[in-house]
Image: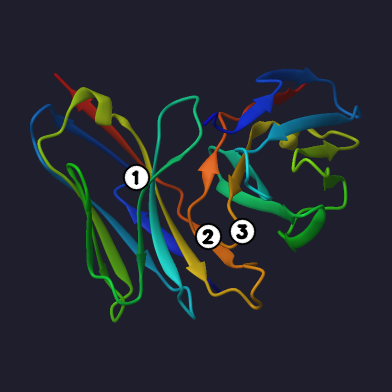
Amino acid sequence: KNQVEQSPQSLIILEGKNCTLQCNYTVSPFSNLRWYKQDTGRGPVSLTIMTFSENTKSNGRYTATLDADTKQSSLHITASQLSDSASYICVVSAPAISNFGNEKLTFGTGTRLTIIP
Amino acid sequence: KAGVTQTPRYLIKTRGQQVTLSCSPISGHRSVSWYQQTPGQGLQFLFEYFSETQRNKGNFPGRFSGRQFSNSRSEMNVSTLELGDSALYLCASRQGSSYEQYFGPGTRLTVT
């Protein structure tokens, strides 16, 4: 069964500190892995999308890594800010069956990150 | 360019009623997907529409249905509401088969 597990479930860190969120998956075959940030009461916003051949991708203070062999990904946040307080969701995609892009997405339940001043 | 919009933002319904939610995608995006998000289950895929055709469907009962119009706007309908249908319903649009999805703010549905 395709699964995506994220850890920790919740995390509290001081403003300015770094942190790393983990995502392990069993989805196979694999197409791409995405990290989303979701602020309370809002829709998710894409941070990074990585395909099989990419093992690191950055978006400002966010850096995602992917190890397709061990089926693990991490999201590293550098010099955290209060605005980083949100849920971070890892999503893994299985390939589309046709050219119409009907990929299969498996979602993690997210890590709730709280930054305190 | 305007983002994905969803209406209404909040809704309270009674068990047994039915509800229709609306989603307007980003201009030029022909694909619209719907998701249900609950604290216990996280995000779960409902269905995806492309050019007025449903091309992907999640594991939800037939009470959940949707459609897409020629202008790419989409509606989702839930009939015979149950307490467990209380959730945040999100729609996302994308261009063709691009991986990048853009989510709307969601509709918070409460069933009492």
Three-letter code for the amino acid on which mark 2 is drawn: Ser
Which amino acid does the dot numbered 3 rest on?
A: Gly
Q: Residues within 10 Å of mark 2 (few under 14, many from 20)?
A: few
Residue B98 is marked as 2
- The amino acid sitting under disc 1 is Gln
Q: Give the image quarter of residue A25.
A: bottom left
Check contact, mark 2 vs mark 1: CB within 8 A. no
Camera-side residue: B27 or A73? B27
Circle 3 chain: B
**Few, some or many residues within 10 Å of mark 3 (<14, 14–19, 20+):** some
Quadrant location, the C terminus of chain B:
top right
* Chain identifier of the residue bearing label 2 in the image: B
> In the image, what residue occupies the spot 91% across and 27% down?
B17
Residue designated by label 3? B96
As helix, strand or loop, the secondary structure at mark 1 comes to loop
The secondary structure type at the circle numbered 3 is: loop
Q: Are marks 3 and 2 in contact (CB under 8 Å)?
A: yes
